[in-house]
Each structure stands twice: as C-alpha cells, then as structure tokens.
Image (spheres, rainbow, N blue to C red):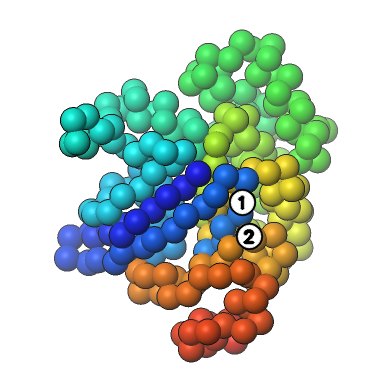
Amino acid sequence: MVFARSVRKSFGPLEVLKGVDIVVPTGTVACIIGPSGSGKSTFLRCINHLEKLTGGILLVDGEFVGYELRQDKLYELKDVDLCKQRAEIGMLFQNFNLFSHMTVLENIVEAPMRVRRTPAAEARQDALRLLERVGLIDKVDSYPRELSGGQQQRVAIARAMAMKPKVLLFDEPTSALDPELVGEVLQVMRDLAQTGMTMVVVTHEIGFAREVGDQLLFMDEGVVVERGDPREMIANPKSPRTAEFLSRVL
C-alpha cells in the first residue's frame, strides 16, 4: 500500500530525510519511533504530499503521490487532482483540527459530502455508524469545545474513516492528551488494526507498537536505523542507537 525508496527531503540547506525506504503491505500496521527531530513527522507528511519530496520515489497503492507519470516523466498534479488523491489517504495529527463551529456530526459529514459528493442521508448514516464504533454516539450534537481531548481525537478518527481511505497516517495522535485519555484513543486504533486498516503510525507509545504493529522502524537523523518485528526489536535491538533510545523510553 505504501512504498518509499530513497526518499529525501530538504528545507533549504537542512536535509531532514536522507534516503528513507519503507514498504507497508496492505492491511498491516507500521509503527515509526525515534527522537524528536529525526524526520518521522516529515516523512509522514510526504506520504500525502503535504511536503514535496526533494528526491526518491513514494507510491501509495501503486500511484505516485502528487505526481502522474507521462511518457517516462513525472508531472505535478493539479490541485483538484491532488485533492482527489489525498481523499484516499487519511491523516490524524497531534492536535485534532476539528472545525470548532461545527457539531461532531457536521465535522464528520462535511468532507464526504463536499469531496466525495456523498448524499446527505448516506453521509449521516455512515457518520452515526462510525460514532457508534468509536463510542461517541451520544455526542452527535456536541461541539468540540464540549469534548475531552480523547473524545476529540476519536471524533477526528471517525472523520478520517468517513472518507473510506486506503491508508491512515497517525502523527503522534496521543501526544497532546492527558495520560488518562491515551488508552481510549489507542483502543480505537487497535480496533481499526483488527479490521485490516492499513496504518502508518508515528508514536511514542512503545506498548502499542509492540502489541499492534506488524513492523517497527526506528528513525534517527533522517534515516531508518533499524527495522523489524516490533516484539523482537524492542526486546533485543541490534543497533546500539536503538537500544539507547529504548532504554530511555521504556
């Protein structure tokens, strides 16, 4: 579902990604860990073309992200086509980015109706089903300010799922939450993984990565230092840098 080879990204003279390779098969969960400034979030933003690559190849479901291939040359997509492509790639941020002037239900139905042209009745039915799934059916008419951080993040997950994406990207989705609220969000993510949702998760929740991840990648200074089975890698890291990092966060 996600294929990256030699992905590079620079901001002026600063090279943040220095050749990242990753393959995420359909229906699997890839977890990315590493210190702040290692390039994790930048790589995630490259997957849905919020950041343009400086070099390398990045495909989602076999298609170049942000570009189309014509006669062996890549051409950047027009904005309208890029928006259609992004509709297939859901992304959850640290801050929930809900529309504060809309109710929970309105937040969820907005994109399917506007972007996918889903009829209002169908969009509402889907939204109610998703709210039931994330345990917030009683918050249909609430506004984001009336919800806890954990509830807002669960609404954000439901909103992303309403677009029926091919892959979900999570950028440290629990880092802005009080510790007591982390568990409810992680449980929703566990449930998504069990349904076969393809997920790429940047996280500091090592327990979640061990339990749910199909592969674990440790990034530092813009490169993937080590990758492998989460349980094996957390228990017996091969790289001294990985071992040093894990010793500090476990």
Q: Residue at x 46, y 38 (%)?
A: 61
Amino acid type of the residue tagged 2 in the rendering: Asp
- Dot 2 surroundings within 10 Å: few (below 14), some, or many (20 or more)? many
**Which part of the image, by quadrant, shows the C terminus?**
bottom right
Q: Which mark is residue 205?
A: none
Residue hosting label 2: 214
From the top left corner, tell me how far across and down residue 174 is, in percent. Answer: 63, 58
Which of the 4 quarters of the picture holds residue 133? top right
Residue in view at x 66 percent, y 36 percent: 158
Secondary structure, mark 1, is loop
Sequence-wise first label, 1 or 2: 1
Relative vertical location of residue 28 with respect to residue 13 in this rendering, above or below: above
Q: Judge by depth and name the residue closer to the eye, 107 or 52.
A: 52
Q: Name the residue type under label 1.
A: Thr
Q: Position of residue 113 (x, y in %)?
A: 56, 17
Asked if residue 123 lies left or right of residue 240, the reply is right
Residue placed at 53% from the left, 84% from the top? 238
Q: Is residue 152 above or below residue 239?
A: above
Q: Is residue 172 left or right of residue 83?
A: right
Q: Quadrant of residue 231?
A: bottom right
Name the one closer to the observer, 238 or 211: 238
- Does the residue at mark 1 contact the one at mark 2 (Cβ under 8 Å)? yes
Answer yes or no: is residue 177 visible: yes
Residue 152 visible? The answer is no
- Which percent across, then down, holds residue 125? 73, 19
Query: Label 1, on which residue?
Result: 28
